[in-house]
Image: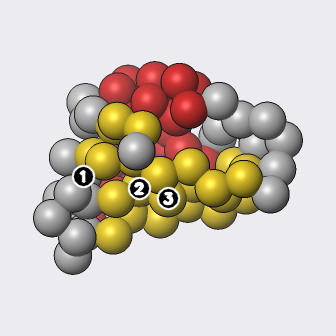
C-alpha cells in the first residue's frame, strides 16, 4: 500500500463534494480524505495499484482545484 499526500485548496464540505466524483472514479484509489482543519488542506490518497501522483493532480484540477504533491 502506498500513501500519497497533497497540499490543496479544497477548503470545505462543498469543495469535497465537488471533487468526490473525480477521485472516486480514479483507478487504484482505495481511500481518500481531505483534512480541512490543516492550514495546507492535506489530501491523503491510499493506493495499492501504482496510481501516479500526476493522475490525482489532474483529477482534482478537472474540478477547478489545485493539488501539489508533498
Q: Is residue 13 visible?
A: yes
Q: Provide the secondary structure element on which disc 1 rests.
A: loop
Measured as percent of width and height from the top left, residue 3 is found at 63, 56
Residue carrying label 3 = 44
Residue carrying label 1 = 10
Quadrant placement of the N terminus: bottom right
Measured as percent of width and height from the top left, residue 53 is found at 56, 32
Q: Is residue 7 left or right of residue 11?
A: right
Q: Is residue 42 left or right of residue 39?
A: right
- Foreground mark, 3 or 1, reads 3
The count of marks equals: 3
Query: Residue at (46%, 23%) from the top-left corner?
Result: 58
How busy is the neighbourhood of tag 2: few (under 14 within 10 Å), some, or many (20 plus)? many
In the rendered structure, which disc, 3 or 1, sits on the residue that comes first in sequence? 1
Which residue occupies the extreme front position in the image? 70
The quadrant in which residue 65 appears is top left
* Label drawn at residue 43: 2
| Residue 49, placed above or below residue 3 | above
- Colour theme: secondary structure
Q: Is residue 55 left or right of residue 63?
A: right
Measured as percent of width and height from the top left, residue 25 is found at 64, 40
Amino acid at each position: 500500500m502506498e500513501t500519497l499526500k497533497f497540499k490543496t485548496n479544497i477548503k470545505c464540505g462543498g469543495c469535497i463534494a465537488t471533487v468526490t466524483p473525480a477521485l472516486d472514479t480514479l483507478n487504484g484509489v482505495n481511500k481518500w480524505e481531505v483534512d480541512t482543519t490543516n492550514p495546507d488542506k492535506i489530501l491523503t490518497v491510499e493506493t495499492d495499484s501504482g496510481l501516479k501522483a500526476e493522475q490525482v493532480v489532474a483529477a482534482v484540477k478537472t474540478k477547478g482545484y489545485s493539488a501539489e504533491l508533498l
